[in-house]
Image (spheres, rainbow, N blue to C red):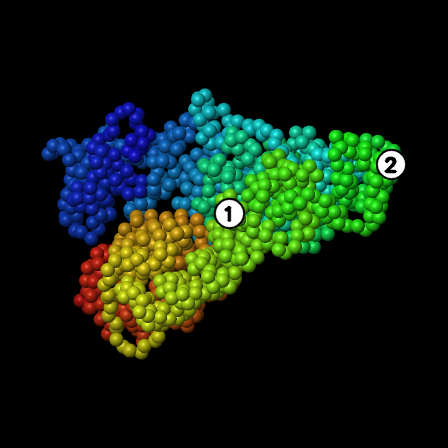
Amino acid sequence: MLNAHHASGAEPTKPLPHIQIYTFGTLRVIRNGQPVDESAWHTRQARQLLKILITERPRPVASDRLIELLWPASTPRTAATTLRSAINALRNVLEPERPHRAPARYVVTQSPGYAFRLQPTLWLDVEAFEAELALARTARGQERRRHLAAAVDLYTDDYLMEDPYADWLQNERERLRERYFNALLQLAELDAAAGDFASAISACRRILARDDVRETAYQALMRYQALSGDSAGALLTFERCRTVLAEELGADPSPLTQQLHQQILNGEIQPAPAQLQGAALRAKEDTTGEDQGPAPLHLPQHTVFPLMDEHFTGVFVGREKERTQLESGLQAALAGTGGLFTLEGEAGVGKTRLACHLLQQAVDAGATVLSATCQALEQQLPFAPLADALGRYLHSLPDTVLHALPPASLAQLAQLIPSLQDRLPELPTRGGDTTIGADENRQRLVDGIVNFLASLARLRPLVLFLDDLHWADYDTLAVLSRLSQRVDQLPLLVLLAYRTDDLAENEALITLLHALRRTRPNRLLPLTGLSLEQVRRMVYMLTGAEEPRSTALADWLYAATQGNALFVTEALRDLMERFPGQPTEERTWRVLVENWSQEYEQLLSLRRNQRIQELILERIQRLPPAAREVLQLAAAIGRDFSVELLEAAAPQDPMAGLATLLERRFLLEQPDARLDFSHAVVRQVAYDNLNALQRRRLHRQIAEALVSLQRAEENPRETAFHFSQAGPTARQEFAYYSVLAGERLARTFGFRQAIEHFDQALDVLAGQPDAAPELVQRALQGRGLAYESLLDAEGVLDTYRRLQAWANQRGDRDLLLAAHSRLTTLLALLGQQRESNQLLSELMETLTASEHPVVRSQTIADLLARRRLIYSPDTPDDGATWARYTPPPPVPGDPVAEILALLAPFHAVLPLFDYGWTLLVQGQLPEATRCLEAVVSLARETGQLWIASTAYHQLAAIARLQGDLERSYAFNEQSMALNQMVPGVASELASMWPRIASAFLSLRTGRLDEAERRLQRVVDFLAQRPGFENYRNSAFIGLGLVALERGEHRDAREWLEKALADPVNLYPYTHVRALMGLARLAHLEGQPAARDVWLRRALRFAGRRSLLEEYVDVVLTLADLRPPGAPVEQLLREMLSYVGSLGLDAMAQKLRQAYQAHKTSAIQP
């Protein structure tokens, strides 16, 4: 670390200076490579002297000024002596070997006092920081970036952060912060110019982590996000900017920020062309010594083409009008003006064939072609067809190209295509990106896919075809809706196809089509059957001859099929299968034309209204038994599949039957060697013809094959589906994979869908007397966590009640305790204290009546007793006594070890958090720290990040009470960083109390507008949410105190009394503030009797519950208001002694000052 830092201020080959001084963050002095320890300073004021002299360097600081800052209460003579002593101590720290009476080198006497002088043997981080910035001003290219990066690395924290409130260093601290922020913005600009948007975005976020109202950083962040392809993230950044500015400053974003927001909304800021990114580009520059700019990417042509039967590939008739429109649209897209077309018609009318004709033209023109078919089995799977098409396309790209594509969009796609993370491990992960929940994540995925497609189109014209859109999922349709708004500005053609007879079952598609009909009325192309002439031409092309017998065949086909293209094709396949054994396909067609009517006159009886399904069924029935069995198995799979899966699922070798199916064009082989049906209708007919027993057997074979191939846990939803169709004997397996599917969805923030899977599993397991207990427990716990993440108190209560009942039924007292304890604490955290108190009473009664060993747990018994006392209702008492403080009982044993011995780590988190918080408010800080540190570790291990975030906030409160403001600041930073990883509204809950606490801190320092904005945000957030009464009442109390400080007494009384009207749903800290607020209000209004009643009530509430900080605050208020008859001096003395015994110096100092002031006032007349 020292070498790295010093290298920025001197040549690396030179020896290290004798002294290195670090002022960014906490003051550190390194002498001869060893840190100077605390004992070497002899006095704290010597450290403060060094800080002041460094801050004012090279100017001297007058002795009188130093005395005023460091010893304001001392007499002039005493202070002068103390100053000389401190200067001598400081010189000895810096120069311990200095001979007696030799002149000092660093701290010199200079009229009118003392000055800090730099020497070659001393290195100062602030000087090195400014030197790097000076070098960066004159440097260019990578040299400039290196100097800026070196300066930014030196700035490890704000200047001398251990003195956050010292007036003498505020100007210097702000000046250095400004220089640091400007350096980060310049660094971000250089990184963005090099195409390294991830580094540019990171630099902007570093600014906002320290100053969340800096609008220039929001502007830069929005721009770089949009340029990287993450326009959804840019729009979210604007929303956060608007919220923070309104809350902290009461202001709106500037016109420039709003203009940038509108440009992003309009799509005017497009992702930068893909190029060599970041480090790769800088490595290239380093080898040439020049900044050569981004290297453009050449995107090779790769296609993902739909399946077509090669027998009919060269045959295309009719559709002249539609072809003209589509070909015109393709030419426009190739020229840069894209479009969206929709093909609609009945099953088999020829939509896919028309699309393939156009796609082949696109391929010939050099465009990228992506296609996918929506599957009925995947209709509930978000983005399924797009994930399939993009996954196959990206798999085909070489690594060099993949690395150069927009990383922000690829990071989004990695959620849908996990293999991307394997190929690109450096991709930014979404977890620490920003506070996003399920809905926001979905929006970002939608935008990520749209932006990625747009980026591909800019590199090479793109055609996207989605078939069978009637089976499309809601999220895929959302992508198409968003894409339709941008397609006109891109070299991109989107082609969609759906069956009109299945449209009614997809409401989201109906909505999309309605919008498209309104905006693109000429681009919805309805297809009808082929005309008689077109069927004739099709037969002529297939048979190679235009003759009467071909015409008769065509006429017969038209009469039978009414021109339905698939029907015509299937009829021709049916006929061809009746002429087996011909040496060539050409010979087969000739024999068919010559003999079909003579040899098979019975076919003339084919009715005109015969359904295509009947014809396909006839073809299936003519298959050899082995081929028919393979076809039935393939139909049950429900989508394209691998030969490996087919072999694993088939009871006998399927290869002979598979060869027949490929020969007769029931199945076709994809370029990636996967297999699929020639048409979805063929699959549907094959599946519909199975009886219930056949379906059960086949689905079980497929599910077991997925398990044997170790694919089941990769795709538990598909496995669960097949087991769900496999009958009653597969219920246990169905439940298992449903639980797995729910757990996987919960990890990706699909909480509602996860709950559906858990409920399905629980429904099945409820009817299974031999159901695996661990599976029931996992399903209930997963359901509970999903409801926790949704902040659904009703769902939480229902789930953990069910878990309690189940544990009680099984006699599992450990799980019963865990569920009861978790629910009790969760309801308190959700602000439903009444329900939490009721559960607490039930829990204590249950444990008291039990003979389970947990009853003997001193820690659990102590926790429950403390919580019951703290949260007991506050009832008025007319007694005239001034309550003494009741110290809490000692902490029994080792709480962390004992709770972990009783409960699994997952369930231990909340009891430990509860105990840590309880010990904190009762002043037992070392024990509270151990519990909360364990909570942070366990909560992070078990994925309960919002609890870890809240625990860090409590650790910050402990550090503040101990007077360690630097550690308090660091813990709060960690709390906020973790909170950014918490999904959705759960992040609001995790930040709720920190927000309220910061508002009360703003109140204490007189920042009333800031406090009011923060409290109002809490009220607004909770306005449409039932429950959360603790938080709501706390916000009401804060608003009442704001009104009191402004002299608005009526509003103050209304807010405070409104909160106190609920004696149960209270938070101890704010409740005491409400009581003291009403006492001050009575005092201001000249009502001493009412004032004293409120003060006694506050003192009694805090004292009887052992609430240390709250009790001390009431005592300090008593010392300020001095009500007659109150034993103020005694209370101050008692608390000073008690707090001093705990080592709480900061709190003791406040009490000492109040005690001295009280004694002084008592002896004055």
**Residue designated by label 2:** 549
The answer to which of 336 and 450 lies nearer the viewer is 450
Q: Amino acid under label 2?
A: Arg
Query: Is residue 267 shown to the viewer in this render?
Result: no
Badge count: 2
Q: Which residue shows up at 44% across the image and 39% down it?
A: 202
The answer to which of 257 and 207 lies nearer the viewer is 207
Q: Which residue shows up at 81% across the image and 31% down it?
A: 544
- On the image, the x and y values in percent for residue 1146 come to 25, 55
- Determine crowd level at label 1: few under 14, some 14-19, many 20+ residues with C-alpha closer than 10 A: some
Most extreme residue toward the top, as rendered?
A: 288
Q: Quadrant of residue 590?
A: top right
Q: Which residue shows up at 89% across the image and 35% down it?
A: 548
Q: Which residue shows up at 63% across the image and 44% down it?
A: 630
Q: Are marks 1 and 2 in contact (CB under 8 Å)?
A: no
Relative to residue 281, is residue 941 drawn left or right?
Answer: left
| Quadrant of the drawing holding the C terminus | bottom left
**Residue designated by label 1:** 707
Figure check: 845 above or below 262: below
- On the image, the x and y values in percent for residue 1073 come to 35, 65
Q: Closer to the N terminus: mark 1 or mark 2? A: 2
Q: Quadrant of residue 921?
A: bottom left
> Could you tell me which secondary element the residue under label 1 belongs to?
helix
Q: Amino acid under label 1?
A: Val
| Quadrant of the drawing holding the N terminus | top left
**Distance between the alpha carbons at the discs numbered 1 and 2:** 54 Å
Query: Is residue 1104 shown to the viewer in this render?
Result: yes
